[in-house]
Image (cartoon, rainbow, N blue to C red):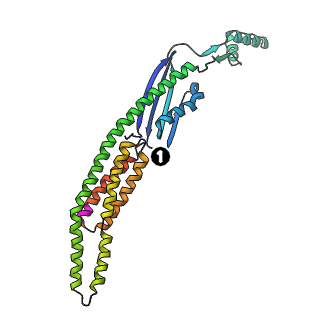
Amino acid sequence: MILSMTGFGRSEGVYQGKKITVEMKSLNSKSFDLNIRVPVRYREKEFDIRKILNDRIIRGKVDCFINCETLDDCSDVKINKELIRSYMNSLRDCASDGPEFEYLKMAVRMPEAISSKPDELSEEEWLFLASLLDEALDKFVSFRKTEGANMEKDIRRSLTNIGSYLEQVVPFEKARMDAVKEKYRKALTEFENVDETRFYQEMAYYTEKLDITEEKVRLGQHLKYFREVIDDEHFNGKKLGFIAQEMGREINTMGSKANQADIQKLVVMMKDDLEKIKEQSLNIL
């Protein structure tokens, strides 16, 4: 099964007057590269969040954004009125006269006049956030599966095309070798006192260098192995990329040995489909 490295997932929920939103998206990358943005409220759990994401996303360039928005009208700000009045009385004692508003402006700048209520993250809220992460990850993985299924169709189509072109090489190959032999037979008649034994040894050596039987066999094996890895292995992107490289070597060698127009056309078409496979492999998990 193929999974794409491109993914997207989003979830949201409300916990005790707070709307919590989790959103994640990813693109292809050679490793797990996470960019995460969390509110200060959840900063102490950042390591746990990273581990949860790493365990399920595995690989890719990932952006994860967690947002916490207060829905009700309650404020986390505490105004210590008694302390402010005490500050103002002390300021009056220090000054002969002055407007009350000026004393108030100075008093609110004093220590502890205005403070935030203690707001510790409870275990229940963390579990709620973790459930939202799981929900977003489920959607994220589902997105990857859908994208991967589409990629797999395209890859299998290209594999079938390469296999078809490989079969079409066979009739041209015999005609090519016959043309080479005939060319050298004609050349032989144009010279006198030619050592025929040595001549045919050289021609056998030359035709062996032009033979593409091994390349065809290996390419066929690579096509079969590629399909086996798709069917049987998970997180197979890197391995499929390596197999595609080996396929490219065999196709390139066939092209350099071909020395025949029809075979070279088929080689070009193989290369075109192989490039499509390589591009897709870069985005496979």
Q: Nearer the viewer, residue 84 or 124?
A: 124
Question: Where on the picture, by quarter, is residue 204?
Answer: bottom left
Tag 1: amino acid = Lys
Residue 219 in magenta? no
The answer to whether residue 62 is above or below residue 190 is above
Q: Which residues are magenta?
A: 261-265
Q: Residues within 10 Å of mark 1 (few under 14, many from 20)?
A: few
**Which residue is at 29% across, 83% downward?**
197
Label 1 SS: loop
For the question of whether residue 68 can be seen, the reply is no
Q: Nearer the viewer, residue 198 or 114?
A: 198
Residue 263 in magenta? yes
Q: In the current view of this chain or complex, which residue is farthest to the bottom?
A: 193
For the question of whether residue 246 can be seen, the reply is yes
Which residue was labeled with disc 1? Answer: 30
Quarter of the figure that contains the C terminus: top left
Q: Count how many numbered circles sit on residues in the image.
A: 1
